Image (spheres, coloured by chain):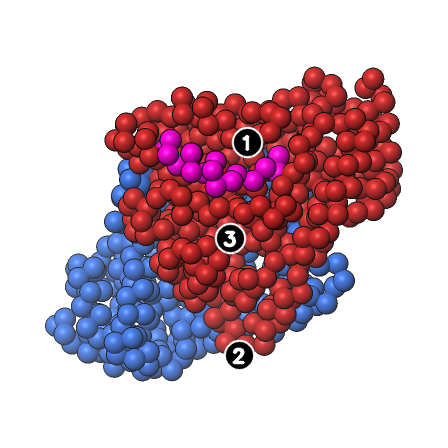
Chain colours: A blue, B red
């Protein structure tokens, strides 16, 4: 018998992954070329060439024990130092290697930092629409998720509602900008106001409220808009970064936590994160990929492919009649569902070989999400299917 | 403020890791050549050449999206199929890819399977001396650790005591053979008796008791003794494997869970493990290393280096007067402490630049552990230090 808690996990397992699996089944039935999979944020484009060059460089090193063996739980000191230097140059921060913990992707980092910070029964706040997996991360630490209602059509964070939802039990607030699923980038003004609210509530309740910034999409911005670096706006901010998208290596599971020295209890947070990385079973971020990251710390994926996809899909859908705010970053479109029931709409989409994800997965019914990290051809060929789907709903 | 539970973790953090960190400090002070680090199971020897060849092969593939991108949470189906085929040939099992879940090392696998199986308050049984990290894994699922007392000097599992400790709340039993820290290999007879006891208790209490076999050292056996494959002896057995030692790539974090079809609730266990791999934040085992494993599924590290180390260290220590059962496998010696207080002894050892780990870390006071995965030279040069340490205790 599996554990009781598991039943809910298994039956309520990610609709995103379910749709991804379904699209693979559709591909077997209709041929891969006739299936349009917008379900998973799994980039179609290869990593930048620097990734391969860095792997080859490290394979040529005589000391392969160093390359494939254990290091500190927090990661190679040299790797952390290079990342700190890059962050400091780009964002005028003052990190050292001691402020960084290498993690098994951003998901590993978020689980580690939540385990470090959150007591059972405390509250974790997120803004809808949000990455549904946060619910599971909260369940892992027996915390209560508190969801700030969405603010369509702009999908900027609903700060008025947010303020009213903070309590003496609030331990962490998770933000994600550029946002999955909306593509919204939180500007300086938004972040400043959010920080002011948090500071006031910290004083009011006499507690620390940690702002955790989940940043896998930091480098994917199409409008030239600056993505403010949260630790410059709020003291108790912690960044959870992933190279999954910036270096197109989502399967490799590599990222980091950055905990500024100014953060309340900073040293103990880092010490505890080192222990938790080990005791949660990650032990350390994969060794070779850590060394590769250090070589590629300022390398970015070519975002022109994503921009082209975004433009074609956004305008193509708008021409049909779909309603959506043009995304500033990430590689998702969050579109109003022509049917009020977004799940019914996504099931209908399957008839047109379209694998798409209902908004309810992100705590926002009446919408659907498209991941446009696929090939441009796929996007062009999908538009007639989206037209037919639209017509079928009239 | 970090979470309350963390305080205990941070202060009681692994003495093994603490000793490892300390030996690095000693190396700075005395010179690396004058420090003898027997603390951590971090092999000194490089991976077999096939690992490098396999990485190069996959880097040369045109489809680098496949190599570095997301796959099923349970891992690439092709990789799981190759592992299943190898297991079936070597151990007369009948695994398919559907019985395997690729994991972030054995530690990731153990955390995943415990989360899948164990309800809060249920009991997890382990045999002392045991890998102390199990305590943390149990704490992660709010389970109770139940420790079977050690049976020196043979350190075979104490089956009489074991039988008396099983209760209606027992959910899992963890075994580890070849054993860390004793090097004992559980034979067919032992495993058969253990299985009989478990079956009887399952009937008595009307429950399923899962036997979880933690197997990072399976391939490291020096005596020709067969390491029985647990799923052939007991139905509700699950294997947690790691390639850390067999392919000398502990930093890469790659292993698997094997859940036989005959195991009670097998399909739901695998489904839940797939979900938990994701929701615990691992998402999937590192992609490139999965593909590398598939190429190296029958490759093993050259154990002659370890055997030479074992022989030199075991006989060298015995000549001095230290008492220890000759290890059959793994790369550890578990030695009687000349001082009753094993922690005091290990602290004294530091005066002789010896980094060693007290037995209490493994639930067995009065002993100390040596990891002999270091260079043979180190072992030879350490013997006069062990002699001086011995003399200082007289």
- What residue is at 83 percent from the left and 35 percent from the top? B383
Q: Position of residue A41 (x, y in %)?
A: 41, 64
Which numbered disc flags the more N-terminal residue, 1 or 2? 2
Magenta-highlighted residues: B180-198
Q: Please state, as top left, top right, bottom left or bottom right, where the C terminus of chain B lies in the image.
A: top right
Residue, disc 2: B62
- What residue is at 78 percent from the left and 48 percent from the top? B375
**Pointer 1: residues within 10 angstroms few (<14), some, or many (20+)?**
some
**Pointer 3: residues within 10 angstroms few (<14), some, or many (20+)?**
many
Give the chain letter at badge 3.
B
Give the chain letter at badge 1.
B
| Residue A316, visible in the rendered structure | no
Which numbered disc flags the more N-terminal residue, 2 or 3? 2
- What residue is at 60 percent from the left and 54 percent from the top? B246
Q: Which mark is residue B156?
A: 1
**Residue A367 belongs to the span the image colors magenta:** no
Q: Report the front residue among B347 and B222.
A: B222
Residue, disc 3: B255
Residue B23 found in image quarter: top right
Q: Label 1 vs label 3: CA separation?
A: 26 Å
């Amino acid at each position: 018998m599996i554990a009781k808690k598991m039943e809910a996990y298994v039956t309520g397992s990610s609709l995103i992954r379910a749709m991804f699996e379904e699209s693979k089944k559709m591909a077997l039935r209709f041929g891969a070329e006739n299936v349009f999979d917008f379900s998973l944020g799994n980039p179609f484009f290869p990593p930048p060439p620097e990734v391969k060059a860095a792997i080859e460089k490290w394979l040529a090193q005589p000391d392969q024990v160093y390359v494939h063996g254990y290091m500190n739980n927090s990661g190679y000191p040299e790797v952390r130092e290079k990342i700190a230097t890059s962050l400091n140059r780009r964002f005028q921060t003052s990190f050292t290697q001691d402020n960084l913990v290498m993690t098994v992707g951003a998901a590993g980092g978020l689980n580690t930092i939540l385990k470090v910070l959150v007591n059972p029964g405390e509250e974790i706040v997120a803004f809808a629409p949000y990455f549904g997996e946060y619910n599971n991360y909260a369940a892992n630490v027996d915390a209560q998720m508190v969801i700030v209602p969405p603010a369509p059509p702009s999908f900027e964070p609903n700060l008025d509602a947010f303020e009213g939802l903070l309590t003496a039990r609030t331990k962490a607030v998770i933000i994600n900008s550029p946002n999955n699923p909306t593509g919204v980038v939180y500007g300086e003004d938004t972040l400043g106001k959010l920080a002011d609210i948090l500071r006031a509530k910290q004083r009011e309740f006499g507690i620390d409220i940690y702002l955790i910034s989940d940043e896998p999409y930091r480098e994917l911005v199409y409008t030239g808009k600056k993505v403010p670096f949260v630790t410059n706006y709020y003291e108790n901010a912690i960044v959870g970064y992933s190279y999954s998208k910036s270096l197109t290596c989502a399967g490799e599971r590599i990222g980091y936590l950055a905990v500024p020295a100014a953060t309340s209890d900073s040293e103990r947070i880092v010490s505890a994160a080192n222990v938790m990385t080990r005791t949660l079973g990650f032990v350390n971020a994969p060794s070779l990929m850590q060394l590769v990251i250090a070589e590629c710390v300022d390398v970015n994926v070519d975002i022109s492919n994503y921009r082209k996809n975004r433009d074609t899909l956004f305008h193509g859908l708008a021409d049909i009649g779909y309603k959506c705010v043009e995304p500033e970053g990430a590689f998702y479109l969050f579109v109003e569902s022509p049917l009020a029931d977004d799940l019914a709409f996504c099931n209908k989409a399957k008839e047109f070989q379209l694998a798409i994800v209902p908004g309810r997965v992100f705590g926002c019914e009446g919408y659907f999400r498209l991941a446009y990290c696929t090939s441009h051809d796929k996007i062009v060929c999908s538009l007639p299917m989206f037209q037919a789907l639209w017509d079928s709903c009239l």
